[in-house]
Image (cartoon, helix red, strand yellow):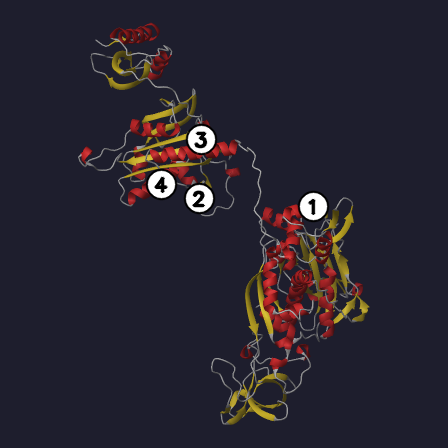
Amino acid sequence: MIITRNWVQEYIDISKITTDDICKTLNSIGLEVDSLQTQRVPSKVVVGKVLEKKKHPDADKLNICQVDIGGEKVQIVCGAKNVDAGQFVPVAVVGCDLGNNFKIKKAKLRGVESNGMICSSTEIGLPKLNDGILELDSSIGELVIGKELKNYPLMNDDVIEIELTANRGDCLSINGVARELSAYYNIPFIEQENSIEVNDLGIGQVLEVESSGDIDSKYIYKVAALEDFRLPVLCKLRVGILEKFEESDLKDTITYVTHSTGVILNAYARKDLKSKDKEEISVLSIKKDAQGFDSVEGKEQLSTICINHEKINEDEKSEYVIEATYMEPELLSKKVFETKKKTGEIYYRTSRGSEPCLEFGIDTFCSLISKAGGKLYNGTEAYNDYNEKHTLDVNIDKINSIIGQEVQKATIENILSSLGFEVKDVANNVLSLKVPLFRHDIKNIADVTEEIVRIIGIDNIKAKPQVIDEANRANKTSVNLRKRNKLRFKAIENGFYETVTYVLANKEKLERYSLPVVKESLDLLNPIVKELDTFRTTVSLNLVEACSNNMKLGFKSAAFFEIGKIFNANREEKSVISFIFSGQKEIESFSNSGKPEDIEFFAFAKKVLNTIGKFDLVPMKKIPNKLIHPYQNASVIIDNEEVGFISKLHPSVCDDYDLSNTFIAEIDFEKIKNDLTKVEAFSKFQSSKKDLSIVTPKSMEYKEIKEVIDSIKDKNIKQYNLIDIYSDEKLGENESLTIRFVLQNDDKTLEEEDITSTMNNILDTLNNKLGISLRD
C-alpha cells in the first residue's frame, strides 16, 4: 500500500508532524513501513508558458518555442510531440542541474540557439506520465510564471510504502490509513467538500438497471459524459507514483479514486449496453453467472463484480456508466475457493475487504470529474442496503486483564470511537460496541483489545513477567508425544537414523507394487507436482527411495526409521513407525576381517524388537503387496493382535532401486505398548543353560510349542530361544528343533536334580499336549 504525505494531508492535518514521526507511528500501530522515498523537484526548474511554436527549418522532429519564464522570454528547441502554444510547462533554465551531471547550458541544435529545456515528468524527478513533456495545471497550485516548482508543496512529496497484513483491507486506501493516524494523533478528519454539477436530465432517462433478486453485491450507478473531462495533473502524478498510469483519463480517475477512498469503481461505455426505446435508454443487467457470481451484462458479459474488471471500451464521444460495488469479503473468498474461479487484479482489494460506504467513493469520483469538465446525469441507480453492524459486548476489566495493566474506561471509549466503533456504556463496566462495516477482522474481545493496544502503543505497555498456573494437562496428545520421543531414542540407539518424508506419494509407483491407493473421488485435486499426486498408504516405499539415494552416494549400508501418517482408501489416517536396513550390518573392522556380512532377517528383527518392545512373529498368511519377500516375511503380533509386518524386500524391488539385501518393517504406532518400566529383583544365584532337541512335524508352527512352554509356569525358566532347525532324509516329514533354556532360581543355586526336574517337566508337557519327543 502506497501513501504520500500530501495525499494524506487532504484527509487530516499532519502539517505539524514530521514524516519520520509518521513512519514510526505507522510501525507502532501495526502498519509496517517498507520504504520511504522523497520526491523533490531540482532548483532552477520554473513554471514557463509556451507563447509560440514553429517547426525547426532543418529538423522535422524539432520545434522552436518561445517560452515566457518570468521576466524574460527565451527560445528553446524542443523535440516533444505534445508541446504546443498556450501550455504551462516545467522549464529547466540555463544553469539548472538535473542530476547525474546533467547541467543545462546554452546550446545550438541544428544551428538554432536554445536556452533551457522544457522537461518531461521523469526529467525533474517525478513519475513517468508519457513520452513527452509535462503539462502543468492549477491542481498543483496557482501557476505563477517564473516560480520554481520546488516551491510548490504538492509537487514535492514523501512517498511511504506500507506492508499490510491480509486482515487489514480497511487500510488499502489513503482514507483508511488517514483514519488510523487520526485515531493515534487524535486529529479530526477534514470534511471532504464534494461539489457535483448535474445536467437537466435524470439518470432514469438514459439508464435502466435490471437486477435479479438473489445477488450478493451492493452497487451504485451514475452516468457521466466525459467528452470535455481532463484529469488534473496532480492526480496523474499520484497515479504515476502507484505505477498504474495508463494515459487514459477515465481509467486513471478510477485508479485514483479507488486508491484514495477504498471504494471499488468501474466504468462501462453506454455503447456496450443493450438499448430500448429507440436506443435512448441503455439497459444494464446484473445476474448470476454459471458459477454463481454476480456478473454485469450489456450486449455481452462486461465484468464479474468484485472479481474481474474487463478492459473499458473507450470513445471520446461516448457516455459512461460509472459503477461502485461492494461484496462481503468472507463470502467472496469462500465462493472463489470453492469454485476455483479465475480472478483479476481487483480481487486483491475485494477479498481483503473494500470500503463498504459506496456513496463516499461515487461522490468523490463525481466531484472530481465535475470540477474537471465532466457532465453528470442527475440521480443514481442503487442497491446498497447494508448489513446490520456486528455487535460486541466487552468487559473493561477483561480488556485490562488481557493487556496486563489498567487503561481508563474513558481512554478505551475515545480510542474505539476514533476508530469508527459505535460505543455505548452499559451496566457493570461493560461497553456495547457496534463494529464498523469496514472492519471485517473484528470478531471478539481479543480483536478489540488489540486495537486498543495498537493505538496506545506497545512500547507504552509495561513489561512484566507472565504468571502461569500450570495444571496437569496430560492427555492422549502428550502421552503420544512422550511415546514418540521414547521410540526415537530407542531407534537411534539401535543404529537407525530418523528421516522425514512427504505424506504425498506417486500413485503410479504405489500401483506398480500393488500397494493400496486412495479412492479417486478423495484424491488430490491440484497436486503440487506430478510425482506427488496422491496420499501415501505406506511409509516403506519412501524409505526404500531414501536408502537408494544414500547407496548411490557410495554408502555401503543405510538404516532409517520414520514415525508418520499413512492413509487408507477412504483417506482415513493413522500413525505408523517404519524401519529399513539395507546392506552391511556393521562397519569393516578387525573382528570381521574387513568383510562385514549383510544384514539378515533375525538381526533386523532384533533391532526392531529392541526399539518397540516385545512382540511375536508369525508367518504371513497372504502376501499383500510386491514389496514383501515371499519366503522371508512375518506378521508382527502384540497381545495376540496383528499390528504390522517385518519382511525382506523383494529382489525385484531391490533391482529397481539398486539395493543389496534389504529388510523393511512397518508397525501401527497406536498398538505399540508404552507401559512404565517395572523394576524387578534379579537373582544373585548362578544360571544354567540347557539345550533341548526335539522332533516336530514340519507343518507345526513354533508358536504352538511356545504356547505350551509358556503354560508350564515354571519359576526356574528365565528365558528360552530357538537356536537351530535341522532336517534330513532320515527325519522325513519331521524336523529337529533345538531350544536353549536359561534356568535360574531366585532363592538358591539350582541342584542337578532341580535342573533335571524342570527339563523333564518341559518334555513331558510337550509330549502330552503336542506328541513331541526327544531327538534320537
> Which callout, 2 or 3, points to the residue nearer the camera?
3
Asked if 512 appears above or below 278 in the picture, the reply is above
Using the image, tell me which numbered label, if any, was put on residue 545: 4
Question: Disc 1 or 4, which lies upstream in sequence?
Answer: 1
Q: Picture coordinates of residue 274 (x, y %)?
A: 72, 61
Q: Picture coordinates of residue 554 (x, y %)?
A: 26, 44
Q: Which residue is mark 1?
A: 397
Residue lying at 71% horizontally and 46% vertically, measured from the top left: 394
Question: From mark 4 to mark 3, how far is it between C-alphas?
Answer: 22 Å
Using the image, tell me which numbered label, if any, was put on residue 669: 3
Secondary structure type for disc 3? helix
Residue that sits furthest to the right in the current view: 200
In the figure, is residue 61 to the left or right of 763? right
Residue 245 seen from this side: no
Q: Which residue is mark 2?
A: 532
Image quarter hosting the N terminus: bottom right
